[in-house]
Amino acid sequence: MEKELWEKCAAFHGHECGGLTIGYKAALYAIKLLELDAEKAGKGCFSTDEELVCICENDACSVDAIQVILGCSIGKGNLLFHMTGKQAFSFYHRKSGKSVRLVLKPRPEGMTKEESFRYYQGCEPEEMFEVKETKLRLPEPARIFRSIRCSRCGESTAEHLIRLCGDEKLCLDCYQAYNRFDV
Ligand SMILES: [Zn+2]
Ligand SMILES: [Zn+2]
């Protein structure tokens, strides 16, 4: 079953690599630590309604495995980024209130890409990650915003991304064009 899951991740990501392995192992570890039903892995059904939330601290290869295994995705609003550039992932399960932050431990130095891929493939998640408490509060469920038409370009956008300029309601592109590039 684990092999099948890995293949799913690799197919989604486009290649096999160390980074993808990091995300893959983090997702499996999260299932264990949050006591989720492992049968649901890779089927997108952990998170039909944002039940499971992941805050990822980088936007590299690893994130793809988390999307595939845990069903956290940008479109659903339960994959969020807090860009510290660290290989660190926080997982929150709304129902149980459980959460955990996994931080990748440093690996032995001087490895080639291929060696690091093999190294991570051979690691147990327990060896790879430090288990910490989450620092960020569980995000509120994704809000649905009213849609407003930009007074300049006529394109509609979410209310919270509209800027007021005199009597006009402007989208970010039109607002920036007016403020910043008019030099
Ligand atoms: Zn990759
Ligand atoms: Zn506009």
Image (spheres, rainbow, N blue to C red):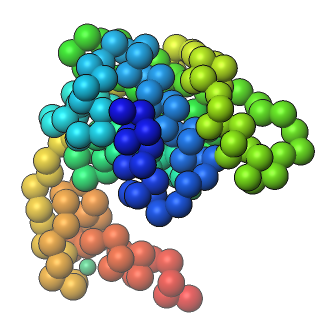
Residue 45 vs residue 166, the one in the foreground: 45
Instruction: State the residue at coordinates (43%, 14%).
Output: 33
Instruction: State the residue at coordinates (14%, 51%).
Output: 145
Is any part of residue 95 visible from this angle? Answer: yes
Residue 23 against residue 113 in the figure, above or below: above
Q: Quadrant of residue 103?
A: top right
Q: Quadrant of ligand 2?
A: bottom left
Image location of residue 175, percent across then percent down: 35, 74
Residue 132 against residue 3 in the figure, above or below: above
Residue 89 against residue 124 in the figure, above or below: below
Residue 98 vs residue 152, the one in the foreground: 98
Image location of residue 19, percent across then percent down: 60, 47
**Quadrant housing the N terminus:** top left
Instruction: State the residue at coordinates (43%, 23%).
Output: 30
Question: Is 68 left, or right, of 61 in this rendering?
Answer: left
Is any part of residue 70 visible from this angle? Answer: no
**Quadrant housing the C terminus:** bottom right
Residue 76 vs residue 68, the one in the foreground: 68
Residue lying farthest to the right in this orientation: 110
Image location of residue 12, percent across then percent down: 39, 57
Question: Is 163 left, or right, of 116 in this rendering?
Answer: left
Residue 176 vs residue 94, the one in the foreground: 94
Question: Is 122 left, or right, of 90 in this rendering?
Answer: right
Image location of residue 55, percent across then percent down: 43, 35
Total labels drawn: 0
Q: Quadrant of residue 132?
A: top right
Residue 135 against residue 47 in the figure, above or below: above
